[in-house]
Amino acid sequence: MNDAEDSSLSDSSNITQPNSPLTDNEVAASKVLLPDKSKIYNEQNNCYQMEYLLGPEDSLTIVVTGQNEYQIVKDVVISIDGTFIFDFFGEVKAAGLSTQQLEKVIQSSLSKDFLVDPRVSVSIKDYQSHKIYISGQVNQPGKYIIKRQCALLSEIILEAGGLHGNFRKDAFIIRANNENENPNIEMIDLYQLLIEGDRVLNIPVYDKDIIQVFDKGENVFGPQNSIFIFGEIEKPGMYPFSDDLTVLSAILINGGGFTKVAKKSKVVVKREINDKIESIMINLDDVMQGKKDIDISLKPGDIIQVPRTFF
């Protein structure tokens, strides 16, 4: 796909040079990262070369062929904990493996006790585990499933129906970080990428990344005046802080509510205190059943993480 020339990404005839959501000084003070152009080309190439790694909710077809063309064909779905149950030897850990690696795991287990020199083939029947979220000034905001380890930014914008309205110049790419760090937030100049055709800004986006495209007239907030909501909610992202926000109200009002697999009893708020990230656990099942006094008032920079239920 030619990222700059696809007319469905935006209608350049109606676009004037948009405003940036942050001034240069605000960018410098807000922990927003600007793209490192020296690394982008390698990342773009790797995006097409990396093997897809399996994850929860992916559906697989497994074919095992033994002697005398004895054959087993089995469809499985990887569970939330990354495993599935296979005939003969039970639970198989699949999350984080490629299909070729999983073939070797199954073949090795079958060869030990069950079949002589089995041949194993694993194919992906339905991709479900790698999801990217896009919100704001696109025609079809929401959750998009990718069939590679990563996708390019323009591919997700195109799949979301392209930009609409008077979008602002800069979009935020928000990536949840590990347990003891704040999210990474990268700022991309959409006008330069999509209208002027600067392909080096077509950065790879990965599972659970959030793309936020702002309206030109929107009162845009910097990351230090925001809260972040990740995990099993309908609209993960970065939202403006207000004094009356609690954990539950932020999830219901800003985040669009819980998904069906959200574990509401184990929600975690991460807060920076004295340059360290502290974790506060809250049982939102109890809050929703009337124990409102245990709900937590949010502070700027707080990160809410809603985990999945393991069935």
Image (cartoon, helix red, strand yellow):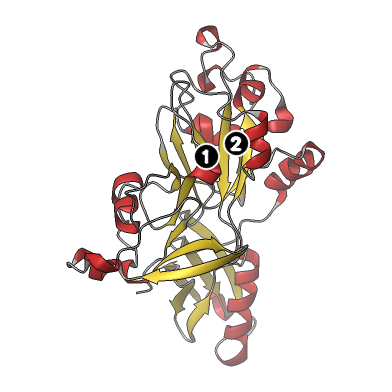
Q: Residue at image x 65%, y 36%? A: 27
For label 2, the crowd category at 10 Å Cα-Cα, with few meaning under 14, some 14 to 19 and many 20 or more, is many
Which residue is label 2 attached to? 153
Question: In x, y percent, where is residue 268?
Answer: 43, 66
| Distance between mark 2 and mark 1 Cα atoms | 8 Å
Disc 2 marks a residue whose amino acid type is: Leu
- For the residue pair 61 and 101, the one nearer the viewer reads as 101
- For the residue pair 46 and 209, the one nearer the viewer reads as 209
188 to 248, vertically: above or below: above
Which element carries disc 2, helix, strand or loop? helix
Question: In x, y percent, where is residue 309?
Answer: 36, 70
Residue 158 is left or right of residue 298, and the answer is right
Residue 19 is left or right of residue 310, and the answer is right
Is residue 6 at all visible to an observer of this figure? yes
Q: Residue at image x 54%, y 45%? A: 224
The residue furthest right is: 38
Picture quarter with the N terminus: top right
Query: Of callouts 2 and 1, which one flags the residue occurring earlier in the amino acid sequence?
Result: 2
Disc 1 marks a residue whose amino acid type is: Ile
Question: In x, y percent, where is residue 239?
Answer: 43, 43
- For the residue pair 298 and 263, the one nearer the viewer reads as 298
Question: In x, y percent, where is residue 270?
Answer: 49, 63
- Label 2 close to label 1 by CB (< 8 Å): yes
Q: Toward which corner of the image does residue 152 lie, by quadrant?
A: top right
Which residue is label 1 attached to? 211
